């Protein structure tokens, strides 16, 4: 086994789990939270329940401030994949709270929360999602096209559901322009789990017509 394969497994048998925790116990304590998060991310798509268990273990036993916001955000995504929507919303809120304290933040948590709200059309949470975007655009601005795409997409779809069609069309056009601005061949500064959602993108295209 390669040196780093033990915390990047895409499968999770009982034997693999035991080996992971055996190796984790031998690591330096300040690295354990990171290894737990990486392993959870490697399992998230295929085994969100197993990923969730690892993130819960991380938050209980190794709540490193450097990975806390990301761990809560990953946990929220796992919960959403498991259709545990209320718990997912609470975990997104925890991620936002942790990210407020994080230096060098790119506001991934408010964008993740906003995309969650419009993806699920959780109208009762729209005002909270927009308020979080507004707050972080002032305190943690990002000019990456991938980030602007998400911000504009959220604002467009919230406006659409609230009947503000002119605003919705304007923001949808901005989102699509940001998507086109992603330069071919250039590495984008994206966060795991934040890739464009085809269903969301199609809604934007229909709205911008």
Image (cartoon, rainbow, N blue to C red):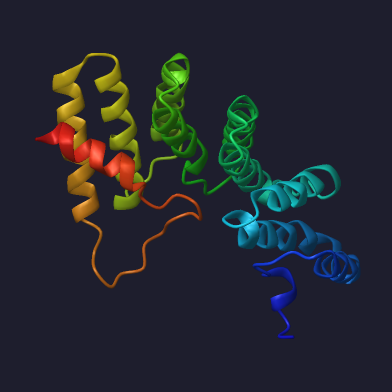
Q: Residue 26, how many percent across, how many down?
A: 90, 71
Q: Is residue 33 above or below residue 176?
A: below
Quadrant position of residue 175 = top left
Q: Residue at horizontal 18%, vertical 22%?
A: 167
Q: Is residue 194 above or below residue 206?
A: below
Query: Residue 189's x, y, as percent?
Result: 41, 59
Q: Is residue 92 above or below residue 62?
A: above
Inspect this view and state whether residue 177 appears. yes
Residue under the image location 62 percent in, 31 percent down: 84
One can see residue 66 in this view? no
User: Going 70% across and 47% down the picture, which residue do you hit?
Assistant: 49
Q: Nearer the viewer, residue 94 or 100?
A: 94
State how many labels appear: 0
Q: Is residue 155 left or right of residue 108?
A: left
Task: From the top left corner, tell me how far across and down residue 107 is, in percent.
Answer: 47, 41
**Location of the N terminus (image quadrant):** bottom right
Residue 25, given in percent of the width and then of the height, sits at: 90, 65
Q: From the viewer's perspective, tell me whether residue 66 is left or right of residue 116.
A: right
Quadrant of residue 33 in the image?
bottom right
Which residue is pictured at 64% across the width and 50% down the height? Answer: 48
Which of the image's four quarters has the C terminus?
A: top left
Q: State the residue in front, 6 or 84.
A: 84
Q: Can you name the residue that lies furthest to the bottom here?
A: 1
Q: Residue furthest left?
A: 209
């Amino acid at each position: 086994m390669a040196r780093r394969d033990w915390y990047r497994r895409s499968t999770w048998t009982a034997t693999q789990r035991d080996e992971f925790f055996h190796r984790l116990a031998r690591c330096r304590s300040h690295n354990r939270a990171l290894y737990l998060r990486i392993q959870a991310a490697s399992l998230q798509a295929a085994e969100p329940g197993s990923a969730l268990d690892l993130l819960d273990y991380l938050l209980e036993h190794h709540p490193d401030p450097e990975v806390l916001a990301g761990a809560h955000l990953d946990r929220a995504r796992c919960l959403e994949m498991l259709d545990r929507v209320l718990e997912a919303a609470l975990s997104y809120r925890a991620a936002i709270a942790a990210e407020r304290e994080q230096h060098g933040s790119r506001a991934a948590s408010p964008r993740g929360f906003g995309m969650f709200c419009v993806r699920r059309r959780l109208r009762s949470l729209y005002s909270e999602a927009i308020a979080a975007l507004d707050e972080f655009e002032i305190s943690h601005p990002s000019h990456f096209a991938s980030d602007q795409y998400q911000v504009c997409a959220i604002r467009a779809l919230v406006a659409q559901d609230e009947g503000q069609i002119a605003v919705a069309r304007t923001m949808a056009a901005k989102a699509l322009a940001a998507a086109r601005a992603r330069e071919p061949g250039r590495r984008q500064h994206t966060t795991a789990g934040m890739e464009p959602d085809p269903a969301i993108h199609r809604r934007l295209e229909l709205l911008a017509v």
